[in-house]
Image: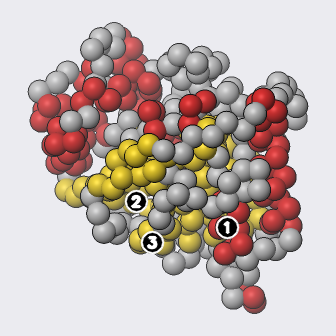
Amino acid sequence: MEEISAYFHEMTGTAYEVGKQQAVWMKTQGLQTQYIRTEPLEKEALKETKQMIRPYLPQLEEEIAGFCDEMQLEERYLTFFYSSHLQPGCSHCVRQGNMAAGQQTVMLRNYDFSPIFDDMRLVTTHVKGLPYHTGSSLLLFGRSDGMNEHGLSVTFSACGPPIGNEPGLKPPSVAGLQVYHVIRSVLESCQTVEEAIFSIQEMPVASNVHLMFADRKGEAAVIEIIDGRKMVRRPETGFIAATNHPLADQTAKGMTKQHSVVRYDMLMEALVQRQSSDSLAKLFQTEYPDGLAVHNYEELFGTMRTVIFRPEEGTMDYCFGSPVYNPTYSLKAGGLLPFHEQKVQFHQKDYGPSFWRNV
């Protein structure tokens, strides 16, 4: 068993002020090496990346300027830009509400990867001129999931091999945004599932992912993106799910692992049986193969967090690390957790060669 720190951080003010707050926090925690590279990105690559991001995150440059001014650092050294010049396994689902039965819409997600490559940080941001939101930060400035003040909730899972510049990741087939840009853009500019779909259809996206959405109206959808191709799936019988293999694109080959099929079938069986919200949550909190929580961190496939979103009431239940070993906290979107730092337990387990078998 290993213990690693997780963080909650609230930021308020202008985008520039929020950037300075991020830098002060990072220096306080001594995390510079995690987010700052020793070798700068080429100036032309930086220019191209900023031009690509600017239409979808117009205030991000001001935030990064505040960060770099506080750090007395050239922005070319930010890991964020290096990883953006063009992620991991997950399970997630939405069960739509039923007013007659007194059920609310719930979206549940496990994010599976490794603490080596994760911020381990939940942030609430109240940036002047933008909707406030609470979400998991990625490379400080990106988001891997979250909910905004309108109740719009967003999660993602990799669809096939994760895309990126880092060793072991699949090089991008198209030029475009990474998923953590897309999620933050949606949280800061959209109110409904339909607005999110329309916005993403206009974006160049390099990541191969399932993007899942739910909103306060009870609407839900998944956008499956593979090598720039986007296909929208909608709930047909009150629910929708995704793990890590293609579901909409039947032409995609060689992208399906045994563990992804096992987890998807498990999710769908529970949804078809109309299990309660508590029963669905229990599935996400139980270890594989009986549930969806996995602990193979050494091979970049361990549960980093479990989140339950309730868009209609604007709340979420959040667990850092695997819920098998760690507590869950409740908060409102835009709200606070009762701590700024907490130790999270990680227990390593190997699930055997069949886990990675191609099917």
Between 269 and 357, the one nearer to me in the picture: 357
Which residue occupies 75% across, 89% down? 100
Q: Residues within 10 Å of mark 2 (few under 14, many from 20)?
A: many
Label 3, on which residue?
330
Local SS, label 2: strand
Please tell me which of labels 3 and 1 falls first in the chain: 1
Chain-order first, disc 1 or disc 2: 2
Q: Out of 173 and 11, give the one closest to the viewer.
A: 11
Mark 1 highlights which residue? 282
Question: Could you say which quadrant of the image residue 112 lies in?
Answer: top right
Secondary-structure class at tag 3: strand
Amino acid type shown at disc 2 = Thr
Residue shown at 53% from the left, 16% from the top: 167
Q: Of discs 1 and 2, which sits in the foreground?
A: 1
Q: Percent x, y for residue 82? A: 39, 21
Q: Quadrant of the C terminus?
A: top right
